[in-house]
Amino acid sequence: MPRIAFIGGGSLTWIPRFAHDLLREPRLAGSTMVLMDTDPAALELMGRYSRALIAKRGGQMGVETTTDRDEALQGADFVCSTFMAGGHLAWAKDLNFAYSYGIRHPKGMSVGPGGLIQGLKAVPQLLDLAHAMECICPQATLFNFTNPMSSISLALQRHSHVKTVGVCHGLLIGLDVFARLMGCRRDDLIARGAGVNHLDWVVSVRDKHTGQELLPEIAERMRRLPRLSSPDEISDERVLQSSYEQYRLFGALPVPGDLHVTEFWPYFLRPGIDLWETLQLRHNFVERRIEGKERYREAILAGLSGAAPLPEPRGESLEELENMIASMIYNEQRIYQLNVINNGAIENVMPGVCVESPVMIDQYGFHPVHFGSLPPAIAGWINLLGTVQDLTVRAAVEGSRQYALQALLLDPMCYHMEISNVERMLDDLLAANREWLPAFFR
């Protein structure tokens, strides 16, 4: 049975969910989770929690922990990247710097200054991991879950020889939303879409049983959703105002929802706009996330001590890690929405752009499925975003301030800014993250 190494194995966000997911696949009984993290306290907690969850479920899965990355890679069949360079505190600092320049990220992990600085920090670390895998476990598969997904996946597939793919649940979140709007189950729907990570354009949703096209009706039900009275009511299906507007304008529906997709469009995040009044969104102050993680950590500690029931993972991950692994082991040739370099699968998107599109998985790896063409305006926008991806990767690999600046100048989130302010913002972000960016300060 496989050894599955998690680099970032102290993650409260990912490890409970992945332990839960792997236990769902009975054919993976006897597998081993190898948790690796540079934070010994976080690692110890996730090791204890994973063992307790496995025991609670009556599962058969081993758990090992280590702070040595190369030790974790020894004998690994699958490797999962689940870490964030600098953690949530550095992420909060990055988004607050951007906020001081008038950029209010509802998410801040894909594009804009938040996505750029995350990419500059993460790309060298992921490439270092991939190059270590080339030496220690060259046969292993790397599933990347770290953001910014597009830039990292592009870098890994361009600059390493490992078998790798970027994994995100954007289309599956969209399907869940569509099913709730239509009052059916997700499995009753078949969606067809492609794009870039966190901006996946759904061009068709059909009823699996009748073949009826449902996308116009789904969009109409989105349009009729009542306004929220409080941010506490926010949920995936209730944050869809710009998604509907983009469907009206471009003829396809972007997912996973406004918290992500608005960041790709300057029209929705203009300076001075009240995000709550116009789109019922709010800036992603990561401090709220940190508070939630601390509450979850305390609940886990209480569960492990016996003072309270062991808390369940905070929902399923929709990434289906267990199914992808099984598909590779048992050559099941399943199709997933994954992040790969476009090789002609999307005909009117440039070759070399990292796209999120249908990919078949079997024992030989990852095979993009021919998609055809996207609506021309959407393809044009994706080509621009692909150029920003390319510049971000070049900047990260070469330590080039010039490429980083060009990426920001082409990024739609910065179109309202004076060039001098873009340069100052970039220099502030680089200086604030100096310890994570040695290539920029040689």
Image (cartoon, helix red, strand yellow):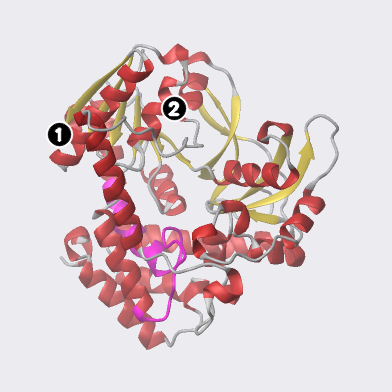
Give the residue at x 71% y 53%. Answer: 374
Along the line of sight, which residue is nearer the eye, 223 or 166? 223
Indicate the quadrant where residue 233 lies: bottom right
Q: Which mark is residue 22?
A: none
Q: Is residue 110 magenta?
A: yes
Q: Secondary structure at mark 2?
A: helix
Q: Quadrant of the C terminus?
A: bottom left
- Image x and y of residue 208, in percent: 78, 32
- Is 279 one of the magenta-colored residues? no
Answer above or below: position of 86 versus 76.
below
Q: Which residues are magenta?
A: 100-125
**Residue 40, relative to residue 355: is it above or below?**
above
| Location of mark 2 (residue) | 21
**In this picture, residue 412 sits left or right of residue 69:** right
How packed is label 1: few (under 14 Cα within 10 Å), some, or many (20 or more)?
few
Q: Give the left or right position of residue 413, taking residue 187 as reference.
A: left
Which one is earlier in the sequence, the residue at label 1 or at label 2? 2
Residue 68 - label: 1
The location of residue 72, given as percent across then percent down, is: 22, 28
Q: Residues within 10 Å of mark 2 (few under 14, many from 20)?
A: some
In percent of width and height, residue 204 lies at 76, 46
Q: Nearer the viewer, residue 290 or 134?
A: 290
Does residue 438 appear to the left or right of 120 in the view shown?
A: left
Q: CA distance from mark 1 to mark 2?
A: 25 Å
Q: Amino acid at mark 2?
A: Asp
Instruction: Left or right? Give the position of 91 relative to 216.
Output: left
